[in-house]
Image (cartoon, coloured by chain):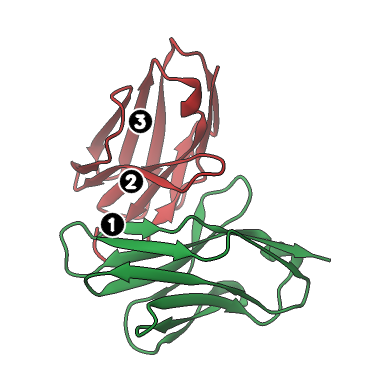
Chain colours: A green, B red
Amino acid sequence: AQSVTQLDSQVPVFEEAPVELRCNYSSSVSVYLFWYVQYPNQGLQLLLKYLSGSTLVKGINGFEAEFNKSQTSFHLRKPSVHISDTAEYFCAVSAINTNAGKSTFGDGTTLTVKP
Amino acid sequence: ETGVTQTPRHLVMGMTNKKSLKCEQHLGHNAMYWYKQSAKKPLELMFVYNFKEQTENNSVPSRFSPECPNSSHLFLHLHTLQPEDSALYLCASSQGLEGHEQYFGPGTRLTVT
């Protein structure tokens, strides 16, 4: 079984400031890692994913995340946020080589970008 | 239509009504999911289907009844719901169960009165 902990439920930040949304996971097997974004009144949309290879992955809208296996973390970063980045962000993991394989989601982090 | 569509987008129903939510994916995926998203609560996985077969039921009350006639369509039949069932119901699909990102529909906002 796996679990995901998003360490901050709410992150307020000013426009053009950098932001980091933290995600730690726990799993007895290797996992794939994902970040999703949910804008108001919409479904979740994939931001980026880590499957293998380089531990720094780049996604849409200028976001990137770094996989740290020793710290079991997958933090999401953006060097300069915009008002339009205000949304709910979800970290998710999916176990590799299991019959289940479904994703386990964190509780979400609400990012609020203020002018 | 592209991606994952859900109808209706909004639904208000009484506790004695019977209604159905519909999800359709146009991505050629094999797996489909129902999630419940309530305010102030984590995303809850309800059901998983893979190649039309149900692979997971997360202890969902029987007043929720899923149906997957083919890999492109997923329904959630609702009857005798409770006010606490009011939530956003999200459908998702993926290429397979292992290691694949999920594609979500916009959701159906359900209000039970």
Report the mark closest to the observer, 3 or 1. 1
| Mark found first going from the N terminus, 2 or 3 | 2
Q: Within 10 Å of the Cα at label 3, are there few (<14), some (14-19), or many (20+) other Cα atoms?
A: some
In the image shown, does B6 or B54 lie closer to the viewer? B54
- Host chain of mark 1: A
Image point (27%, 35%), residue name:
B59
Amino acid type at mark 3: Leu
* Residue A102, label in figure: 1
Q: Are marks 3 and 1 on the same chain?
A: no
In the displayed image of the protein, which residue is found farthest to the top?
B16
In the image shown, does A92 or A11 lie closer to the viewer? A11
- Circle 1 sits in a helix, a strand or a loop, which is it? loop
In the displayed image of the protein, which residue is found farthest to the right?
A115
Q: Is residue B14 above or below residue A113?
A: above
Q: Say which quarter of the image contains residue B67.
A: top left
- Circle 2 sits in a helix, a strand or a loop, which is it? strand
Image point (24%, 58%), residue name:
B97
Amino acid type at mark 1: Lys
- Host chain of mark 3: B
Task: Left or right? Give the position of A105 relative to B13.
Answer: left
| Residue hosting label 3 | B76
Report the mark closest to the observer, 1 or 2. 1
| Residue hosting label 2 | B33
